Amino acid sequence: MVTKRIIPCLDMTEGKVVKGIQFESFRDAGNPVSLAQVYDEEGADELVFLDITATVDNRSILLDVVEKTAKKVTIPFSVGGGVRGVDEMRDILKAGADKVSVNTGAFVRPELITECAQTFGSQCVVLSLDAKKVGDNRWNVFINGGRTNTGIDAVTWSKQAVELGAGEILLTSIDTDGTKRGFNIELTQKVSKTVSVPVIASGGAGKLSDFSEIFTQGGADAALAASLFHFGELKIKDVKDYLASKNISVRN
């Protein structure tokens, strides 16, 4: 049985971890390297670092944070933000990351996914997809840190990205992000049923049952959370113990 993964997410800007609600109203959540070390010790399966203003600021990701984190943690971690080419992905991997997530750069130039997959392997390429509901049964892809509605259906884009070489989908629901009202089960289910690669559900975790529901109903392979863990509302062990009690397979 494939185990489900619990992944803390560290959204960064200017070298600090921040957390917002629906991609707005950010507040400081601490030092990224220190938090990463804590989550490693607490039993996280992986970590996700997202430099959420790199694209908008038209700059590269903060590689020194990646290097410092790689020296402190033993679990895999992925890094994203402002990646536009193979060279930037190479720099991030050389700094110590295990995977690189692409978002706006891949949407603007889809061949970026194929170039990265052919150079480093699909297992290193994560498509980070931010989606927002725009009508009945439809979610559009939003880029530039959730600021720009592309008009493209999120499920369609997820399928295309996998065909181009993405090895995993990090699916964030802007509607539920930071609300603690639960993951977007309907959206996650649609994407999970459409693609053949693992899907990480992101946005909305607020209580223990949200995690079991996104796995049993949403079909996710991993669940990502931020503020719940950053501000001590839940520990990773709490989540894993709860899931195990529901007969959902997790790593001890």
Image (cartoon, rainbow, N blue to C red):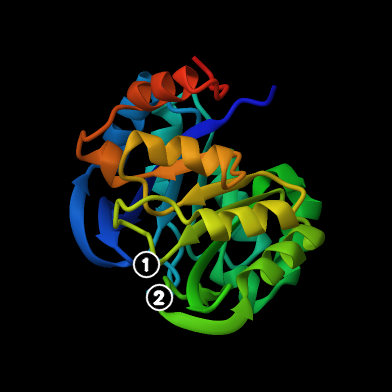
In this orientation, which residue lies closer to the viewer: 172 or 89? Answer: 172
In this orientation, which residue lies closer to the viewer: 209 or 201? Answer: 209
In this orientation, which residue lies closer to the viewer: 166 or 133? Answer: 133
* Helix, strand or loop status at disc 1: loop
Q: Residue visible at 64% across and 65% down? A: 85
User: Which of the labelled discs sits on residue 185, or is there none?
Assistant: none
User: Which of the labelled discs sits on residue 56, or is there none?
Assistant: 2
> Dividing the image into 4 quarters, which one contains the N terminus?
top right
Q: Residue visible at 50% across and 28% down? A: 45
Can you give x and y, in whole percent of width and height, for residue 162 in the image?
75, 58
What's the CA distance linking mark 2 and mark 1? 5 Å
Q: Residues within 10 Å of mark 1 (few under 14, many from 20)?
A: some
Q: Residue visible at 31% across and 39% down? A: 207
Marks 1 and 2: in contact by CB < 8 Å?
Answer: yes
**Residue placed under numbered mark 1 in the picture:** 53
Residue type, label 2: Val
Can residue 81 be spotted in the picture? yes
In this rendering, the answer to whether 78 lies above or below 234 is: below
Q: Residues within 10 Å of mark 2 (few under 14, many from 20)?
A: some
Along the horizontal axis of the image, is 200 left or right of 61? Answer: right
Can residue 67 be spotted in the picture? no
Q: How many marks?
A: 2
* Helix, strand or loop status at disc 2: loop
In this orientation, which residue lies closer to the viewer: 214 or 122? Answer: 214
Can you give x and y, in whole percent of width and height, for residue 163 in the image?
81, 61
Can you give x and y, in whole percent of width and height, for residue 182 in the image?
38, 50
Along the horizontal axis of the image, is 45 left or right of 14? Answer: right
In this rendering, the answer to whether 172 lies above or below 32 is: below
Residue type, label 1: Thr
